[in-house]
Image (tube, helix red, strand yellow):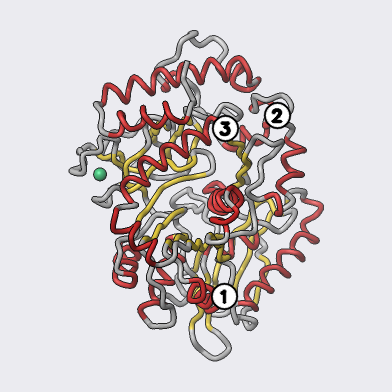
Amino acid sequence: MISFNPISIFMDSRRVTRGTPEMLAARQQERLNELVKFARANSRLYAEKYRGLPENITDVRLLPPVTKVELMEHFDDVITDPSVRKADVMKYISDLSNIGKSFMGKYMVWTTSGTTGTPGIFLEDKNWDAVITAVNVLRMGGEWYTGKVIRGMMKAGGNSASVFAGNGHFLGVTMLERQRSSNHSRGKRIRLVPVTLPIAEIVKQLNEFQPAMFAGYSSALGLLAQEQLEGRLNIHPSIVISSAEPLSDENRALIQQAFGVPPRNNYGCSEGGVMGYECNHSRMHINADWIIFEPVDANHDPVPVGQLSDRTLITNLANRVMPIIRYELGDRVTLLPEKCDCGITLPLIKVEGRTDEILRFKSPSGGLIPVLPLALWSVVKETPGVLRFQAIQTSPDELKIRLEAKHAEDNGSVWKRVYVNARDYLTQQGLDNVSILRAEEPPMRDPKSGKFRNVWAEKSAPRD
Ligand SMILES: [Zn+2]
């Protein structure tokens, strides 16, 4: 039996971090076999899918993949706790004051849109929580919080600020709220700065709060690094953490130049939690002892090491309440063959950038105002009744929205709400001159890449 005791997880993770490939493979096989047995016994969906397969499964490739659509459509048959009902989870997430609070007193809930545009809801149990906590403290903590960083944080008062979307049960804000509520006195030093605020307001709040630890979406950090270089932002964090979007080389250099520290980067998603983290050599290692990571092509066939995949299958070896086994993620990754000079033996990967980009609209006074894709995304996505959408900048002062409502008959009323929310948001950014149009066509995948993008600018729109 796998022990989910925090101390044994911690000790074992420490051995595996710099262990042999055989140690890693043994963990994966044992944990997979136990997970599959549990899923077969407790989840109707997996019992049905795995009917006729051998009793012991130590090779993940013997199992059929699952998609988000499948898990969402059969939610109550996936969940292994019979007292959990999708209807109750939906009710719980519709109340934003529940962010960071546990569902039924024992599960964390995360929502996501991801690269397919289908909304997803994921439950995390205490096993997974214990694993994430131990692995993060040991691996990210061990690499990132050096003596110099800790001394700097103490000197700077220890405040921590995160620039995330706060208007939904997203991974970043949920983890932050939980941290804040777990310790009242420490909680006052942890602040969420909503990414949906105008940049000038974000800058003002950060200047007042003076965070020693500063985290956010990569695109937001890149923009704030520019604010710092131009003198409007004036903060001196000891550590800067980028998450939720891949960190481009441009943003990495900009952040280092602006704040004088190398950005720290992790890689996660609602389905797999924090799956990877960058070491002191700025290379991404994956927590392969708890997540089986398979780069695959469009037919789910394996892509060789060193080659860019079309998508990725992940298996979460810790979570039992909602088994995630060979689950399809849209992420394009390359598993790297080489060993890292840092001494950590966990596999290295390179993650391709998400395709959303910063929009730049012309303001009434003629200047360009940046709009962060994840901020606009969260505003539209959290509008009640929205199933899927795409926001496309078509000219310097025009935004077109493709919309699909959860129920087709509500299309008109959902559009009205989306329009009002997007209008308010743009006005708040100083962009009341931008027109918002509803596209005639529904949301669709990019015909060339096959990917579903949420927010982008057409070629004719202004760029940097
Ligand atoms: Zn390394």
The residue beneath circle 3 is 126
Q: Amino acid under label 3?
A: Lys
Q: Nearer the viewer, residue 263 or 305?
A: 263
Give the residue at x 29% y 36%.
Answer: 347
Q: Mark 3 or 2, which is nearer the eye?
A: 3
The residue beneath circle 2 is 76
Q: Is residue 64 above or below residue 73?
A: above
Which residue is outermost to the left?
Answer: 341
Left or right of 14, for residue 70? right
Which quadrant holds residue 344?
A: top left
Tell whether circle 1 marks a residue whose Cβ is less than 8 angstroms from ligand 1: no
x and y percent of residue 289 in the render?
Answer: 38, 29
Q: Amino acid under label 1?
A: Pro
Q: Quadrant of ligand 1?
A: top left
Q: Mark 1 or 2, which is nearer the eye?
A: 1
Question: Is residue 445 among the parts visible in the rendering?
Answer: yes
Q: Is residue 185 above or below residue 86?
A: below
Within 10 angstroms of label 2, few (less than 14), some, or many (20 or more) residues?
many
Question: Is residue 310 among the parts visible in the rendering?
Answer: no
The residue beneath circle 1 is 198
Left or right of 385, for residue 311? left
Give the residue at x 54% y 56%.
Answer: 186
x and y percent of residue 305 in the render?
Answer: 27, 35
Q: Mark 3 or 1, which is nearer the eye?
A: 3
Q: Nearer the viewer, residue 70 or 7?
A: 7
Give the residue at x 67% y 32%.
Answer: 75
Task: For marks 3 and 1, give the CA distance.
Answer: 37 Å
Count up the numbered dots. 3
Within 10 angstroms of label 3, few (less than 14), some, or many (20 or more) residues?
some
What mark, if any, has residue 156 been given in the picture?
Answer: none
